[in-house]
Image (cartoon, grey):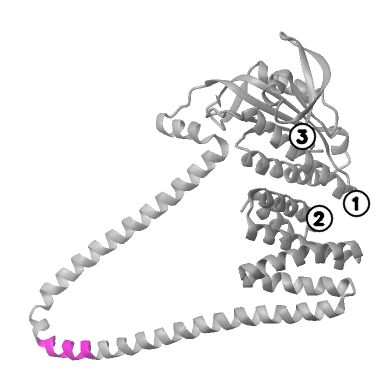
């Protein structure tokens, strides 16, 4: 469905329920935007299930109430879609949520529904097993008759075989050798294909698809000028001081948590991740293939990243834990893109446009998205903007800056 579903389920299985909630909510948001009814119901159910577990752990009534709200909505939709496996799962949690909110009659009623769904799935499985057993019985019955016929035929022809046993033995030996060679070749081909796919997947995780194909075909990939791209820079405020208060394992865990979410968001918006440098994250839209809406794509991704970080902050504050805060800068222009080095190579971009994007980020304030005038001209009809002054850019004179936000509908 989307990357947030998998991330949410991973965090849920790991027992990291607060983190799972963040991803499940993002998954729900995406499903609503795309009009995916069943997937939206599953996301609602996952949120409700997570709240139900949190309610048990924290004894907070608001968690139980949230569980009821989301699970009721999920179960209602899944009933119309007749999704028995999910109904069995979510109705059990909804029954528990009702019990935690003191709605005992509803809890009992929902538990009865859960039993019905469970038994329906069990009965269906048993019917399938019975059908399979019947089929197997018929098969073995026919097989038994066939084997008896074959035994009679073998007995009748035994004397004839004895005369040509030597020749047949040679033929069998040749056939066996050929069969072994064929099977070995097929096995080797499967191994080669599997390893090739692993190699290709690794290459595509490092390089854009077009660049990876050029590298495989020619053994090299030439640097390219891209005249219309938009570059996104993010950076965590006060990262150095905060990192001193966390263990190395905790620090890497927090960075991985945030950057994994960023990866999912930029992929959704057709943006190419370039690299991370410490706590900085850089991505670009408009390459290696031209993208007409590159600036709009990057601003939409920046807003989603900013919203994710705000939700992350709320969760960490509620848990009494340390958290990152972030600045985002965006600029549009031309860049040169290509592969650096011959060992452990990396795809990177260069140019004044990259430097100005970095200046937009460093000149931003926490929790905001700062864009340059060149980006502003490309997105001003799609977003609300606020002029905030100018900065000096080396070799470029002054550059106007604007804050950008989604359009407010009155």
Q: Look at discs 1 and 3 and give the one toward the viewer.
A: 3
- Residue contact between numbered discs 1 and 2, judged by CB atoms under 8 Å: yes
Which of the two residues, 256 or 94, is positioned nearer the viewer here? 94
Residue assigned mark 1: 318
Mark 1 vs 2, N-terminal side: 2
Q: Quadrant of residue 65?
A: bottom right
Q: Residue at x 77, y 16 (%)?
A: 400
Q: Looking at the rendering, in which quadrant would you find the N terminus?
A: bottom right
Stretch in magenta: 149-159
Question: Could you say where residue 231 lies in the image, as x and y percent from the top left?
Answer: 67, 26
Indicate which label's residue lies in the foreground, 3 or 2.
3
- Please provide percent x and percent y for residue 21: 77, 55
Give whichever of discs 1 and 3 has the lower sequence position.
1
Which residue is rendered at x = 50% and y = 31% of the image? 211
Which quadrant of the view contains residue 254? top right
364 left or right of 9 in image: right
| Residue drawn 70% across the image and 81% down it | 115
Please say if 78 is above or below 242: below
Whether residue 158 is in magenta: the answer is yes
The secondary structure making up most of the magenta span is helix
Residue 221 covered by magenta stretch: no
Image coordinates of residue 391 in percent, x first then y, are: 81, 14
Residue that carries the numbered disc 2 in the rendered image = 18
Does residue 56 appear in the picture of this structure? yes
Mark 1 neighbour class, 10 Å CA radius: few under 14, some 14 to 19, many 20 or more: few
Toward the viewer: 238 or 127? 127
């Amino acid at each position: 469905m989307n990357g947030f579903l998998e991330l949410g389920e991973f965090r849920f299985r790991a027992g990291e329920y607060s983190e799972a909630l963040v991803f499940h909510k993002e998954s729900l948001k995406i499903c609503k935007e795309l009009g995916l009814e069943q997937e939206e119901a599953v996301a609602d159910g996952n949120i409700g299930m997570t709240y139900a577990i949190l309610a048990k752990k924290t004894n907070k009534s608001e968690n139980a109430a949230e569980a009821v709200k989301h699970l009721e909505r999920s179960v209602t939709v899944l009933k119309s879609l007749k999704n028995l496996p999910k109904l069995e799962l979510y109705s059990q949690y909804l029954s528990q949520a009702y019990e935690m909110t003191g709605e005992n009659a509803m809890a009992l009623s929902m538990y009865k529904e859960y039993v019905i769904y469970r038994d329906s799935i069990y009965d269906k499985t048993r019917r399938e097993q019975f059908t399979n057993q019947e089929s197997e019985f018929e098969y073995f019955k026919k097989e038994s008759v066939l084997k008896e016929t074959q035994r009679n035929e073998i007995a009748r022809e035994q004397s004839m075989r004895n005369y040509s046993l030597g020749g047949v033995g040679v033929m069998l030996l040749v056939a066996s050798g050929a069969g072994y060679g064929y099977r070995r070749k097929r096995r080797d081909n499967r191994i080669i294909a599997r390893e090739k796919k692993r190699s290709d997947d690794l290459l595509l995780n490092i390089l854009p698809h077009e660049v990876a194909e050029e590298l495989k075909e020619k053994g090299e990939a030439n640097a390219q000028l891209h005249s219309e791209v938009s570059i996104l820079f993010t950076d965590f405020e006060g990262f150095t001081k905060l990192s001193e208060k966390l263990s190395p394992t905790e620090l890497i865990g927090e960075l991985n948590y945030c950057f994994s979410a960023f990866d999912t968001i930029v992929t959704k918006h057709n943006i190419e991740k370039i690299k991370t440098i410490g706590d900085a994250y850089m991505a670009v839209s408009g390459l290696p293939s031209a993208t007409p809406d590159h600036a709009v794509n990057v601003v939409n991704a920046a807003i989603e990243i900013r919203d994710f970080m705000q939700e992350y902050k709320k969760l960490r504050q509620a848990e009494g834990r340390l958290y990152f805060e972030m600045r985002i800068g965006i600029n549009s222009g031309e860049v040169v893109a290509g592969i650096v080095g011959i060992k452990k190579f990396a795809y990177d971009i260069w140019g004044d446009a990259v430097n100005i994007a970095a200046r937009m980020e460093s000149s931003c304030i926490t929790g905001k998205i700062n864009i340059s005038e060149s980006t502003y001209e490309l997105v001003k009809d799609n977003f609300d903007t606020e002029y905030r002054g100018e900065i000096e850019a080396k070799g470029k004179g002054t550059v106007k800056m604007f804050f950008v936000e989604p359009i407010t509908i009155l």
